[in-house]
Amino acid sequence: MTVTLVIDDEPTVRRVARRTLEPAVCAVAEATDGEEGLRIIEAGDPPVDLVLTDLVMPGLDGWDVIETLARYRPELPVVAMSGWIGGGDARLRSYGLEFLAKPFGPEQLKETVAAVLERARRMRGLAAEQRTSARLAQDNDARIRAGDLEVRRRADLVRAAWEIHQQRLGLGGPGLRSRPDRV
């Protein structure tokens, strides 16, 4: 099961988040401030899949958490929440974060967390596909260099299909630079 870490100095917010999200959406871990939240993430117990952090807290606040995670764990999705943002809209947009304005309802919390977790799951899947594609391309390139005629024929077929596709779209013909160089 996925785990959302709720970082908020208000016990009521943490309690409502737990009641709303468990068990239907995800498990919930709690931290009372940014420092405790970062310790939980660093320890990896439990492994955190999403951070839901208040922006305004005493000590290490949500902005500090966001900046630290952007630098050291950019793959970890974050949802910011606050009852007062004080001109932080542009700053939030610069990080590409979802934002929940307090007070928010249980449905809004569920929908936001579920959507962000689903987006993160899809992104992990795409990253895995890209790694696999890169390995296959390297393997095919090596086999072509080694003289594997079957792989060379397949690569030529894909390039020809790409050129036909581009021609149908009116984007060019043979020799088009945007065609795939690898198969």
Image: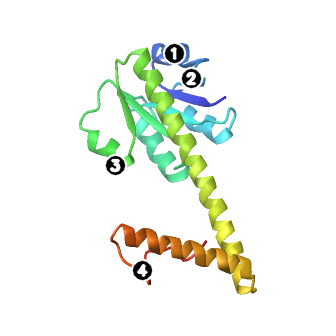
Q: Nearer the viewer, mark 1 or mark 3?
A: 1
- Read off the residue under disc 4: 176
N-terminal of the pair, mark 2 or mark 4, is: 2
Colour theme = rainbow
Q: Is residue 3 left or right of residue 59?
A: right
Q: Which mark is residue 2?
A: none
User: Does the rendering let one see residue 116?
Assistant: yes
Residue shown at 63%/54% (left/top)? Answer: 128
User: Does the rendering let one see residue 76?
Assistant: no
CA distance separating discs 1 and 4: 53 Å
Q: Which mark is residue 20?
A: 1
C-beta proximity under 8 Å, tags 1 and 3: no
- The crowd level at tag 3 (other Cα within 10 Å; few <14, some 14-19, many 20+) is few
Q: Which mark is residue 25?
A: 2
Q: Nearer the viewer, mark 3 or mark 4?
A: 4
C-beta proximity under 8 Å, tags 1 and 4: no
Q: Considering depth in this image, is 111 or 68 the residue closer to the camera?
A: 111
SS class, disc 2: loop
Q: Amino acid at mark 2?
A: Val
- Read off the residue under disc 3: 94
- The crowd level at tag 1 (other Cα within 10 Å; few <14, some 14-19, many 20+) is some
C-beta proximity under 8 Å, tags 3 and 4: no
C-beta proximity under 8 Å, tags 1 and 2: yes
Residue shown at 60%/48% (left/top)? Answer: 125
N-terminal of the pair, mark 1 or mark 4, is: 1
